[in-house]
Amino acid sequence: MMTDVMTETRTEQVNPSTFSLRIEDGIGIITMDVPGERMNTLRASFVDEIQAILTEVAADRAIRGLVLCSGKADSFIAGADVHMLNDCTSAEQAEALSRAGQQIFNRLAALEIPLIAAIHGPCLGGGLELALACHGRVCSDDDNTRLGLPEVQLGLIPGSGGTQRLPRLVGLPRALDMMLTGKQLRPRQALKAGLVDDMVPQSILLQTAIELARQGKPTRSRKKDLKTLLLTANPLGRKLVFDKALGTLRHKTRGKYPAPARLLQVVRTGYERGMDQGLAAEAEAFGELVMSPESAALRQLFFATTEMKKETRWQGAEPNRLARIGVLGGGLMGGGIAFVTATKAGLPVRIKDISNQGINQAMANAHGLLAPKVKKKQLRDSEMKRQLARITGTLDYSGFERVDLVVEAVFEDLEVKRQMVAEVEANCPAHTIFATNTSSLPIHQIADGATRPGQVVGLHYFSPVHKMPLAEIIPHAGTSPVTVATALTLARAQGKTPIVVQDKAGFYVNRILAPYLNEAARLLLEGEPIEAIDSALLDYGFPVGALTLLDEVGIDVAAKISLVLARELGERFTAPDVFGKLLADKRHGKKNGRGFYCHDKKGQKGKKDKKGKHKPVDESLYALLGIKPRRRLPAQELAERCVLSMLNEAALTLDEGVIASARDGDIGAVFGIGFPPFNGGPFFFMHQQGIQSVVDKMDEYARKYGARFAPCEPLRKLAESGGSYY
């Protein structure tokens, strides 16, 4: 590759495609623009190109300052190209990549003339590390501008000096908060933190950066509050910061994510032994983490979701244009769907409910989600009002004569949903798509009797809608490809990661979840304490325990789904005799304050965790079930019994074509039910463990606990053939 290098008096070619240099009155403007890509990403091959640019700059004494900017309209640098990490076959090779990045950024930082970064749009990972190596930074005030080091989300740490430069710039507490969580700062936050020197409208961003470069290297002191100074200016203060961060990490990660702990070690090394030792520790840790199974799994998820975002068609069909959306039902689900439609997709949405109370509640919930963002200055009040204005309500179908797609979110009753189909067909345009949000009812039965069955599709959201990232798109046999493509488009616009699944009982997520929950209930009937079961699953890597999840979802909902699955798929889905007894005792979970845990205020006066949020177990439940709780099995075995049931069912769903690929199955499990991300999903986990190893474990449990653990035939055949899912 060649880059155009131009001055007022000459034009030279030095690898033209990615970096260009032009001179304006003594200020060199370096523009990065990766050809053929929507966003800039850093690649190892760019090192030579940057070196060539710097050689040209050093040779031209007329250049008194430099500005680094992006040639992309809506982004600075989104990070490093993650694919190059997959090409590494050893920790030493990955460490060499890190050292190469460090060396070139060190050369930038050592320039005698000022170098200013002009940042608009995402400035993440290696992009921010590059900006940190500059002597100053100016960012646009655009809402798309974000600055952060999110490497920990891929099981990594910053590898090009970020672990050393960020704490020295913004202070240790803030830097650790950013790097350990992957938090991205908005422009105003970045300015307040001292991460950037100025924030201006995009229209004057480049000129402001040029003027800053003319003034020389920024020397104004960065004000740090007294608390930050006390915590970072002496060894004792820093020890307090590191110890607190480590304690928080252990509580959150339970030792399952190695990257955050390594990051703390690397940052600490830099503080105690200096920058050079810190960089060496950073490169070594980066190399080792690249080769870790946790990072491999997290990167696999990253590639899968990135690939899915590019799939805009379905079976060759283009989606319909969406301008207005209707929602039937203003309850918890309907209100949540309306919220993400108005705020994420930016589309006007009309809610129809049978009462004003339902509409008002949906609007109140939307306001309740946005108001805290305004208070934290993450959202302008005017923008909140603009988003809320997109949500309107009606008790009839007025306004529905213009909607392009209707999401039905009424309660789970087949006849009611069929009535909704008929009403939509009677009151909406002929092209309107009917998307039903159902967790258990077959889509083909809902479409039965429809005038336009090709425009009926399942669109299954997960609660709470504004938080849960997955959506299941469920076409029945007669759903048109255009309808599926349009539903996918809406889900993505709402901020969801959608997967297409077949119209079979339980679809995908609930089908693999049911045996997992059933096994947890069996463990309870065997006398294992509720907190022991949930704690074992938390230790395994799930975000919540199975019994906590049942309380959240609703014991009544889970029982109903289990009945449907048992009727459609057979005896293996028959739930243990727990749900019936709980429902007879009016225990529906969190929704009515009674479940496995105490959810009412009176019940919460017992045990609490350090944050005071823990809900104690409802001890009266043991007497109701006729059991005496006692820990019998080790935590690993408790978790494996639940997880193996899920893995077995996942293998069956893929064999039956419920999901199209192992990739979709992994995305569905991680984003839909919180399967441990560091394991990459059920299929990637079995791939990493080895299919034969998984089958052997299932056989072992089948001998100990019964035939329900016996590996399904597709899984056994895969093991015998020596195959795998990836």
Image: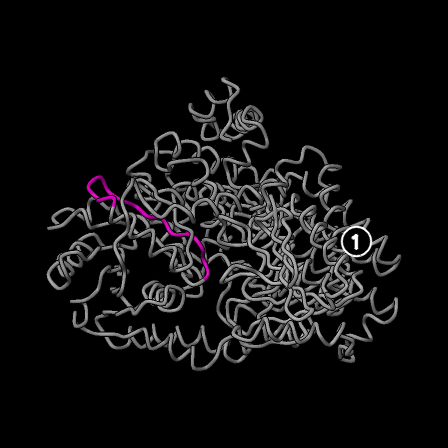
- Point out residue 332 in the picture as x, y percentages from the top left corner: 35, 66
Quadrant location of the N terminus in the rendered image: top right
Q: Quadrant of residue 64?
A: bottom right
- Point out residue 390 in the picture as x, y percentages from the top left corner: 32, 73
Magenta range is 467-481
Q: Name the residue: 65% across, 72% down.
A: 210
Q: Quadrant of residue 678?
A: top right
Q: Is residue 475 magenta?
A: yes
Is 361 placed above or below 21 here?
A: below
Dot 1 alpha-carbon crowd within 10 angstroms: few under 14, some 14 to 19, many 20 or more:
some
Is 27 situated left or right of 650 in this image?
right
Is 726 placed above or below 405 here?
A: above
Is 407 situated left or right of 697 in this image?
left
Q: Mark 1 sits on what residue? A: 265
Nearest the viewer among 181 and 539 is 181
Name the kind of residue labelled 1 in the image: Gln
- Point out residue 397 in the picture as x, y percentages from the top left corner: 16, 69
